[in-house]
Amino acid sequence: MADLTDLGVAAIRDGVRLGEFSAVEVADAFVVKVAQAKALNAFLVETPDHALAAARQADAARAAGEVLKPLAGVPIGMKDLFCTAGVATTAASHILEGFVPTYESTVSQNLWDAGAGMLGKLNMDQFAMGSSNETSAFGNVISPWRRSGGSNADLAPGGSSGGSSTAVSARLCPGATGTDTGGSIRQPAAFTGISGIKPTYGRCSRWGTIAFASSLDQAGPMARDVRDCAILLEAMSGFDAKDGTSLKLDVPKWEHGLSSNLSGLRVGIPKEYRIDGSPEEIDALWQRGIDWLKDAGAEIVDVSLPHTKYALPAYYIIAPAEASSNLARYDGVRYGLRDLPEGAGLQDMYAATRADGFGAEVKRRILIGTYVLSAGFYDAYFTQASKIRTLIARDFEQAFTQCDVILTPTAPSAAFALGEKSADPLAMYLNDVFTVPSSLAGLPAMSVPGGLDKQGLPLGLQIIGKPLDEQGVLNAGLAIEERAGFTARPEAWW
Amino acid sequence: MSDTNIPPYLVKGDTGDWEVVIGLEVHAQITTNAKLFSGAATAFGAEPNTQVSLVDAAMPGMLPVPNRECIRQAVRTGMAIDAQINTWSRFDRKNYFYPDLPQGYQISQLYHPIVGEGEVLVELGDGTARLVRIERIHLEQDAGKSIHDMDPTMSFVDLNRTGVALMEIVSKPDIRGPEEAAAFVAKLRQILRYLGTCDGNMQNGNMRADVNVSICRAGQYEKYQETKDFSHLGTRCEIKNMNSMRFIQAAIDVEARRQIALIEDGKKVVQETRLYDPDKNETRSMRSKEEAHDYRYFPDPDLLPLEIEQAWVDNIAATLPELPDAKKSRFINDFGLSDYDASVLTAEVANAVYFEAVASGADGKLAANWVINELFGRLKKDEKDIVDSPISSDRLGQIVALIKSEKIYLKEL
């Protein structure tokens, strides 16, 4: 029998339904892979029992002749930002070390209700703040990819969903959850040669997902191909009365609606995304993407998103502002870390707990956020950034009168080596330059693999859609996937 | 109609008379079964930390969802003071650290409150009245309680009150004396109790007030009124968390005298937050303007702007109960009551309902005499409430009717 861990979500689902293999066999195979991959540091907690229990249920349901649930027999990885009942949840931060929620996030519950099982909790950038996974309090995840030519440099798996990208790419799980605030699903997907989609803001409930920046945070799936993303997103999405920003809409049948025939589709190419000093390979990839979509029947139109250059500065005001307030609850009073030095008073406890509990990048963003909200600076920073956000959303609105989806590169480069950018926060922030604008506008956007660079590392293409048009995004992604023929995978060295 | 053109309260200083200018922020806990943004219960006096949801405890990933009933109660309150109802309002976060504030921020409405400008007619008992303008009513979360006296080294926190819905009712600086301030709070309390939007229980802290006090010379207030320029008024101090009418009056008086003494001594009043100590009858500095928190208000990104439909608002307007002022003037007109008797009978809605039942089919004035003098007098002596009255309103109505028709006579005792 072929290695079951080579299969994706759809293939596992279908194989279990048809009885080609049992769900327990699948779960066992992945559990072994996870246990063997410690060197990648992708998992913070391994939960083989959870995966096996779900698998047994799937097998029992099949034996009883029941209709199987949409994800019956599919084991997945869960980003550690999602609260999971009875399983430690830390957001990869020391301040939540030992925290075990009594409740299950809506997104993870939706997945379990669809029959999926959990292989474990995935490492990430601390509180989802980072683009390389180096801000995790529990050691960085290492990408399974290596540069060609014998380099052994450890590469960044992208961030913040770097545990998810590595786990999927290294075949430790067929699919995983991610969250995306400014690119945290798309950039790691691009770095590791997998697919990932951030749906329209409000599609996935934020209830039980540890908050970074509430007005931007969206959950989404990361998987090996577009179909698998569609299947997982269907299970994750849906209205939730416990989240006031949740969209009261039915979940479309995205998998059923998949079609790579793009005739009549207008694809916008935004000129502002051509940046000076961009590697030639990124431009070449973008051109190949354009050609593939043309080949699929789409019409290519030039569009303009004039406020693009203000997106990154606005994002790095709004997201830290919200984070500075969202992270105030980690104060040592009720749960998580409490540092109470001898003779300490209340203020000392706050200071010691937060100084010890938060990592440097989290502190940096809390400081930035506190500053931009403070009296005397609020109008100059937060108000201005909010206005820019409105202008960026309007840019997209106007562009979408001329086109149906927008095609761009996902990231300005392939994966960089760990440590290469960690000393320079601004260089790190620039990684989000292509992903942040659609986050600010709340639009659905996905990354699909487009090819390899000269060093043999994956590059991703991003498709941005109109509000609620995940189907259009997935279909364009599928057309690229079929033409890119991306079959490269990292060779196991771990 | 009451005379609203009345002089302010004067305080004698060494250098002449001073006027007092007062504005109040009344915090009224909304009567509902559930908290403002969580489903947790709100009963007073429950065991500590038994009415706390995951949202109230600010567990990771928890989100607020507005409680429709709290919003309805705020809208009803706004209508009762003839205020503008804002069909678009928004919640903001007020950020500060304290153990009884688990989120690290209070959800409030700084920039876009649900209720805009309104007014309250405050009768002063001598036929005069002051029209007090209301600046706004906004919705916000209450904090929990810190308990510092249970252990010599530790403090305890009770989160039962955390997240309970409050209305903050903010007056303009239209109140001109200690008695007026108390009368204003009493009038608000009466309106809230008529509406059933707050039980008005000040002892439990369900209704409490922050009192802003400043002093000025004669004529300055009128200049402020003409120009809307606050610099014509004195520097104000805010006395926090007053939960008794008596203390409100005493605190204003003693604070005004403190400010006068400072100025007459050639010193300055410093804008600050103060606390009133009833034992010593003095106010003490709590924190100065420099020490004031920077609350870093910003729109709560967990909550969409609150948009309410005009039809819903209209429907609420159509079902509003008769309010104290309307009831009082109806009693005067329909039953020929004196202003004083009508005030007494409408002070509490239960009394008014009882009286009206007695007066139906009987002589209004005679019924009022019997209810106020005989019944209320007797109930007060027995320390009973109208709901505990041993005689039903129907029966008392029959007796009053028989007396009126001279079928029975009162024996002089």
Image (cartoon, coloured by chain):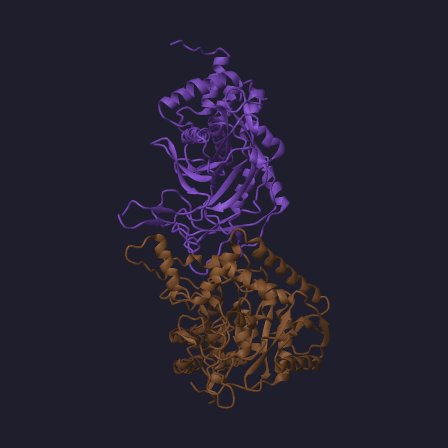
**Height in image: A226 above or below B51?**
below
B274 above or below A315? Answer: above
Quarter of the image with the N terminus of chain B is top right
Q: Is A210 in front, or is B179?
A: B179
Counting the numbered discs, the total is 0
| x and y, in percent, of residue B176 in the image | 51, 28
Q: Quadrant of the C terminus of chain B?
A: top left
Q: Is residue B314 left or right of residue A358?
A: right
Residue A368 lies, in percent from the top left, at: 50, 60
Regarding residue A253, the answer to whether it shows in the image is: no
Q: Nearer the viewer, residue A141 or B326?
A: A141
- Check the image and name the residue furthest to the left: B152
Asked which quadrant contains residue B129, the reply is: top right
Q: Is residue A170 above or below residue A365?
A: below
The part of the image, by quadrant, that contains residue A182 is bottom right
- Residue projecting furthest to the top: B412
Q: Position of residue B76 (x, y in %)?
A: 55, 39
The residue shown at (41%, 32%) is B244
Give the chain letter for brown: A
Of residues A116 and B78, which is closer to you in this image?
B78
Residue extending furthest front?
A: B266
Q: Is residue A19 above or below residue A372?
A: below
- Residue A269 appears left or right of A84: right
Q: Nearer the viewer, residue B129 or B14?
A: B14
Q: Position of residue B329 (x, y in %)?
A: 57, 24
The answer to whether any part of residue B283 appears in the image is yes
Q: Colour of chain B?
A: purple
